[in-house]
């Protein structure tokens, strides 16, 4: 692709915005917000160019390749395929939504807040477009720190505990990932090849069983923590509960997808033999996560925690679909990532709306809100049903494809997974009933006269999500088309794979 | 024509969008004005912007009765009027007027029904045109709109198929749907949620039409889930009532239990055949082994059991009566609950290959028919009687499907759709007229004041009871005759007993409601009136097919015109060999040489059917008109003193709801809480423990940090040696 370095523009527009913010006086909140929003919108605008991705063309398009640290074979290689293109679009969109939503709620350290969010964008976007493993690692780490700050500074009362847990968990994961990256790069170079971190080169190499096994375990832990996968998930509810609304939107909407993306882009194609061998265990864990997340969500007293546990369940779908290694499962997994980003992002946003007004998220403290906040209730209902996989909304497509793929893999796995159609209806509708139906709780009465429905800014923030949740449910074709080729490549990579010497599950 | 078929569901969808976007602006409800409410739920549906009424829990039926229905209104209004302190004088008269309460000269105005009803009307016109084309013109329409999901070999189109079976359902769904829209204009008048109601109704019409028009299993599933959503929204329409909110949730979740099976069944079809299109699946189903086909059929049937409220998933339908009565008529009697029957009938080539699945369908059908009828005998809520009756009648259809009498099942579906829609709308008119009363013990003698409602409901009841010439007589007796002719004598006998029970509880309802003395508060009696024309007109219109449909479609019995229509759709069961319930070995196919003879076996069966129905009606007359105390005496006379216990068991729905509540609701919460404890204590405990361990070890290791360079150098050297060692041994 000649012409503009689109990907660089997408990734670094927010950085330029962050630098520009340094020149804006911090007390001028209005200016700060507009500059930040402009930067995020610029990034979103550039990312729309990715809609021009040609599914029939080369694998990685919009490529950029510059030398970086040549001594160690590290290069600045960017490129997107269908999978990363849709994730980039999701990221830029949700970032704009999060920033727009933060307009009113964030009143302290506004400038620092927006700088942090912009840096977070840089990290997240960089992860999705890097084709150099070391560059990927750098962006991965960049994405970690701003989220630490977002929760730690603008978070709730137990934010210190939550951030420490979050950071230690993910740092352990990313260090393991660094080891794995170094291991594959060194192994490849050890065979007499030039030293490189290039993804496209490294995935061609046939690694020994030992490298496959240990490398995969290290990748697995790194990505599984991020997803998060049962039983490595306990950082997530804490982080969500303490994070400010925008933090939750980006955490659930994008950061969790880094883990799923890591599996689909790196762990599986680089080390397909190990991936195939470990698949049964991962599928087992995924099924546990799906059901366990749903059951634990059922009894959560806090709306945000409920949505957080539902994320554990939904991300279990991503893992399940990724490791059944067929088109339906893999496409379903990728589609679920997109859909979950939209629906859960929206749900967190909506929970934020009521939290801003009452400073409470306890389900038992709600009740009867449908009478007072009809628009809010309607939107919450829309995303509730999207979340429980109602056909016609985006959640259904991914969920159905994943279970279908799982059925092709093993009927019993599909049957166990399918139980979640019951469980998800229970936990979401039970919450919906307690929050919106019957009459307000005594506690809610004190806020009743002051309650307001969705305001203009919130509508603007929500509207793209509303459009997408319907559009992707009714017409998922374009996204599925983008995902088809990347998925085929993964299947190609794992075809006939399986560890010979280190395959305990073969 | 193709485009027109797409318009059939598209118009209600447009109506829905219109109602959502524009509807609120078309209704004008004065802030202090109170519309007249049609039944006692209505009292709770007035959302004032900021007033106390939002906090008021809903008055129970007992409280309502303790005062008078008016007191409820006045009380609520007093709250609403608040500071103004003006209670309109004509308020207590609210029930006496059909529709309007004037408050300070401001009349509430409702216009949001116009476009939705108009669109459904156009959709109905097209439906009828299509019906005629398909049934009389012999055409089959196939329309593909666009490719919906494509993932590898899994390709699903949004496409429609209208054949004879779909056409029959189209007749019921479109017609009853349109009539319910008209009925609701009057029935929901005065409800603040007026536009919302029409929006949901239109969304339901869209979903239901999608369900019956889809040409593949996934489209069917889409419609299936979407009608479930609409059912949820409409059962919970009066959401401030905890019972309504709970019933809505219950309906959705119980349906999802069935969908668990239905979804898996669809996936299993695709995994085995690589397609979900009806045509292709039915062409290829024979290539699979019987076990696979049976599992597929049973999974699909699980969905049908949920949607059509068959045992053991019947529990949601009676609770669904919390919804406004037009909803009960449309969704929970005439259309949505038929979806399960439609699914099995549509998938008849699959079921026909799976004897065990057929047998299961028949057994569930026969059992549910008895079970639900036995509950209906003792219910006192007029809508509950009809709800259990619906469960029981749907069970007849499954019974017919299970023995391979496909056409008889669809015949009963069509006739039941009309007469049960009529009965529900009639019950709504009664509830409306009786000031929100639903308990038949507090009704009586309504025929004196509600002539039209009375006559039409009697017509519907005659059909439901299976009295000759009414549609239910032909369709029900066809099912029983098929059972007899195919050798399922046990099923025949049970089915005939249920027919007698049906006639009894139906006329028990009629006599308790319309005959005898008025048993409610005297003050209410003066206000009882015939309902508005928009309510009565649909009753009259529906009475027409209830009278003539059987005569048109069902003569001669078992070979009526409907058999010719549906013949291309249905596969004869191909297996041979007796199943339990059939005493004739090797005979469960229809004998082609057998023909109906009025002065033969066929006539005799009709006579038996008519007689048991008449007996049931007579018993109801004797117990509820002639000697009102004899029902109680009969209960006491049951030997061994079992009578009262049996009565209680029936009145308490055989405790199925209570058992589910204990096992599933309590059990589910218990398990979930246990898992949450595990999550917090064990998993997170391990995490925190690891953190504590790291801190402790770190604290110990701090002492290693001596600050002496030579110590560090030693450490570095040792570490390097270790790395090399590991690398050399493990990696190489």
Image (cartoon, rainbow, N blue to C red):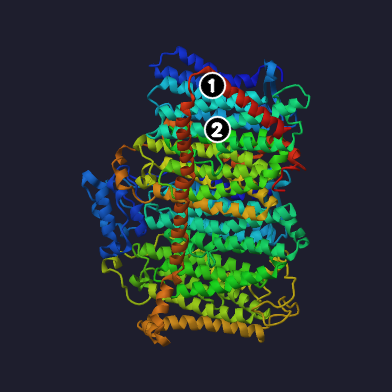
Give the alpha-carbon distance from disc 2 to disc 1, as whole Å: 27 Å
Q: In the rendered view, tell whether residue A36 sits above or below residue B442.
A: above
- Residue A295 image position (x, y, % from top left): 49, 51
Q: Which quadrant holds residue A113? A: top left
- Residue B86 image position (x, y, % from top left): 22, 48
Numbered mark located on residue B479 in the image? none
SS for callout 2: helix
The chain identifier of the residue carrying mark 1 reads B
- Inspect this view and state whether residue B129 appears: no
Considering depth in this image, is B446 or B275 the residue closer to the camera? B275
The residue where tag 1 is placed is B711
Q: In the rendered view, tell whether residue B112 sits above or below residue B539.
A: above
The residue where tag 2 is placed is A172
Q: Name the residue at 64% across, 51% down.
A: B219
Query: Left or right: B524 with respect to A290?
Result: left
SS for callout 1: helix
Query: Left or right: B296 with respect to B696?
Result: right
Do the numbered discs 2 and 1 sit on residues whose CB atoms are within 8 Å? no
């Amino acid at each position: 692709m000649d012409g503009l370095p689109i990907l660089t523009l997408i990734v670094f527009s927010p950085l330029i915005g962050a630098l520009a913010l340094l020149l804006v006086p911090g007390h001028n909140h209005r200016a700060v917000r507009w500059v930040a929003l402009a930067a995020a919108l610029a990034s979103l605008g550039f990312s729309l160019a990715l809609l021009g991705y040609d599914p029939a063309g080369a694998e990685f398009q919009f490529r950029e390749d510059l030398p970086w640290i040549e001594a160690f074979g590290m290069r600045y290689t960017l490129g997107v395929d269908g999978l990363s293109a849709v994730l980039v679009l999701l990221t830029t969109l949700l970032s704009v939504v999060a920033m727009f939503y933060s307009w009113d709620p964030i009143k302290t350290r506004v400038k620092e807040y927006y700088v942090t969010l912009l840096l977070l964008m840089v990290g997240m976007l960089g992860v999705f477009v890097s084709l150099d493993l070391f560059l990927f690692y750098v962006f991965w780490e960049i994405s970690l720190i701003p989220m630490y700050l977002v929760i730690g500074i603008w978070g709730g009362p137990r934010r210190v505990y939550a951030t420490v847990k979050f950071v230690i968990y993910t740092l352990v994961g990313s260090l393991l990932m660094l080891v794995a990256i170094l291991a594959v790069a060194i192994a490849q170079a050890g065979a007499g090849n030039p030293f490189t971190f290039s993804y496209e080169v490294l995935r061609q190499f046939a690694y020994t069983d030992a490298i496959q096994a240990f490398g995969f375990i290290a990748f697995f832990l790194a990505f599984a923590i991020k997803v998060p996968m049962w039983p490595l998930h306990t950082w997530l509810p804490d982080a969500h509960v303490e994070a400010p609304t925008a933090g939750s939107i980006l955490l659930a909407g994008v950061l969790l997808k880094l883990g799923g993306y890591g599996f689909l882009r790196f762990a599986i194609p680089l080390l397909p033999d190990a991936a195939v061998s470990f698949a049964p265990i991962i599928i087992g864990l995924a099924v546990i996560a799906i059901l366990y997340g749903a059951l634990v969500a059922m009894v959560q007293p806090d709306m945000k925690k409920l949505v957080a546990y539902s994320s554990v369940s939904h991300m279990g779908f991503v893992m399940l679909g990724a490791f059944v290694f067929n088109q339906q499962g893999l496409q379903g997994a990728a589609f679920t990532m997109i859909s979950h980003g939209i629906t859960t992002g929206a749900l967190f946003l909506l929970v934020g709306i009521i939290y801003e007004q009452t400073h409470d998220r306890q389900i038992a403290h709600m009740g009867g809100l449908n009478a007072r906040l009809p628009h809010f209730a309607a939107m919450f209902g829309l995303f509730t049903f999207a979340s429980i996989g109602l056909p016609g909304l985006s959640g259904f497509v991914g969920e159905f494809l994943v279970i279908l793929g799982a059925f092709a893999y093993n009927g019993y796995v599909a049957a166990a997974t399918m139980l979640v159609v019951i469980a998800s209806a229970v936990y979401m509708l039970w919450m919906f009933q307690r929050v919106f139906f019957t009459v307000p709780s005594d506690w809610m009465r004190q806020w009743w006269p002051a309650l307001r429905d969705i305001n203009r800014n919130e509508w603007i923030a929500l509207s793209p999500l509303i459009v997408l949740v319907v559009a992707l449910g009714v017409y998922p074709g374009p996204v599925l088309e983008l995902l088809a080729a990347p998925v085929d490549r993964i299947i190609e990579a794992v075809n006939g794979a399986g560890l010979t010497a280190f395959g305990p599950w073969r | 024509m193709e485009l027109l078929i797409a318009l059939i569901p598209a118009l209600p969808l447009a109506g829905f969008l219109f109602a959502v976007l524009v509807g609120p602006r078309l209704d004008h409800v004065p802030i202090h004005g109170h519309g007249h409410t049609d039944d006692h739920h209505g009292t709770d549906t007035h959302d004032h912007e900021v007033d106390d009424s939002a906090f008021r829990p809903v008055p129970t039926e007992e409280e309502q009765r303790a005062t008078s229905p008016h007191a409820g209104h006045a009380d609520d209004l007093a709250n609403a009027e608040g500071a103004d302190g003006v209670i309109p004088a004509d308020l207590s008269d609210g029930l006496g007027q059909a529709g309007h309460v004037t408050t300070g000269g401001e009349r509430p105005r409702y216009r949001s029904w116009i476009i939705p009803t108009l669109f459904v009307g156009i959709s109905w016109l097209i439906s009828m045109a299509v019906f005629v084309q398909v049934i009389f013109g012999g055409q089959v329409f196939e329309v593909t709109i666009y490719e919906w999901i494509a993932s590898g070999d899994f390709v699903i189109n949004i496409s429609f198929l209208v054949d004879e079976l779909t056409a029959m359902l189209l007749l019921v769904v479109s017609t009853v749907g349109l009539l319910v829209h008209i009925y609701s204009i009057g029935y929901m008048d005065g409800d603040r949620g007026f536009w919302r109601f029409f929006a949901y109704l239109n969304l339901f019409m869209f979903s239901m039409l999608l369900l019956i028009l889809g040409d593949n299993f996934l489209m069917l599933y889409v419609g299936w889930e979407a009608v479930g959503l609409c059912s949820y929204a409409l059962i919970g329409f009066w959401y401030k009532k905890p019972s309504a909110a709970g019933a809505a949730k219950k309906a959705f979740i119980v349906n999802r239990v069935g969908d668990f099976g239905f979804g898996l069944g669809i996936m299993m079809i695709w995994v085995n055949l690589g397609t979900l299109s009806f045509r292709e699946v039915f062409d290829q189903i024979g290539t699979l082994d019987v076990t696979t086909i049976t599992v597929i059929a049973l999974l699909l049937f699980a969905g049908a059991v949920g949607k059509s409220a068959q045992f053991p998933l019947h529990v949601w339908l009676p609770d669904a009566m919390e919804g406004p009565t037009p909803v009960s008529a449309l969704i929970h009697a005439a259309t949505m609950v038929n979806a399960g029957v439609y699914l099995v009938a549509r998938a008849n080539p699959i079921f026909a290959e799976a004897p065990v699945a057929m047998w299961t369908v028949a057994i569930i059908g026969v059992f549910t028919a008895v079970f639900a009828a036995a509950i209906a005998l003792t219910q006192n809520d007029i809508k509950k009687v009809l709800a259990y009756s619906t469960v029981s009648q749907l069970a007849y259809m499954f019974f017919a499907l299970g023995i391979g009498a496909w056409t008889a099942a669809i015949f009963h579906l069509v006739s039941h759709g009309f007469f049960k829609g009529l009965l529900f709308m009639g019950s709504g008119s009664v509830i409306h007229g009786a000031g929100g009363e639903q308990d038949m013990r507090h009704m009586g003698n309504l025929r004196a004041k509600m002539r039209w409602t009375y006559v039409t409901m009697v017509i519907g009841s005659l059909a439901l009871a299976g009295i000759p010439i009414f549609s239910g007589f032909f369709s029900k007796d066809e099912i029983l005759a098929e059972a007899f002719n195919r050798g399922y004598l046990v099923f025949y006998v049970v089915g005939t007993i249920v027919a007698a029970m049906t006639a009894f509880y139906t006329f028990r309802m009629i006599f308790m409601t319309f005959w005898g003395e008025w048993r409610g508060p005297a003050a209410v009696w003066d206000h009882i009136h015939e309902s508005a024309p928009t309510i009565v007109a649909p009753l009259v219109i529906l009475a027409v097919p209830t009278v003539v449909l059987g005569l048109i479609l069902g003569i001669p019995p078992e070979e009526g015109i409907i058999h010719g229509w549906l013949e291309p759709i249905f596969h004869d069961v191909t297996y041979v060999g007796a199943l339990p319930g059939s005493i004739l070995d090797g005979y469960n196919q229809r004998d082609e040489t057998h023909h109906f003879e009025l002065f033969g076996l066929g006539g005799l069966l009709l006579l038996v059917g008519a007689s048991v129905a008449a007996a049931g009606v007579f018993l109801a007359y004797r117990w509820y008109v002639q000697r009102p105390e004899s029902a109680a005496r009969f209960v006491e006379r049951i030997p061994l003193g079992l009578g009262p216990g049996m009565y209680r068991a029936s009145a308490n729905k055989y405790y199925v709801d209570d058992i589910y509540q204990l096992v599933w609701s309590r059990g589910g919460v218990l398990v979930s809480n246990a898992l949450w404890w595990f999550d917090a204590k064990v998993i997170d405990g391990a995490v925190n423990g690891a953190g504590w361990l790291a801190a402790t070890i770190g604290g110990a290791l701090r002492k290693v940090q001596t600050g002496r360079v030579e110590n560090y150098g030693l450490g570095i050297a040792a570490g390097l040696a270790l790395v090399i060692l590991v690398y050399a041994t493990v990696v190489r």
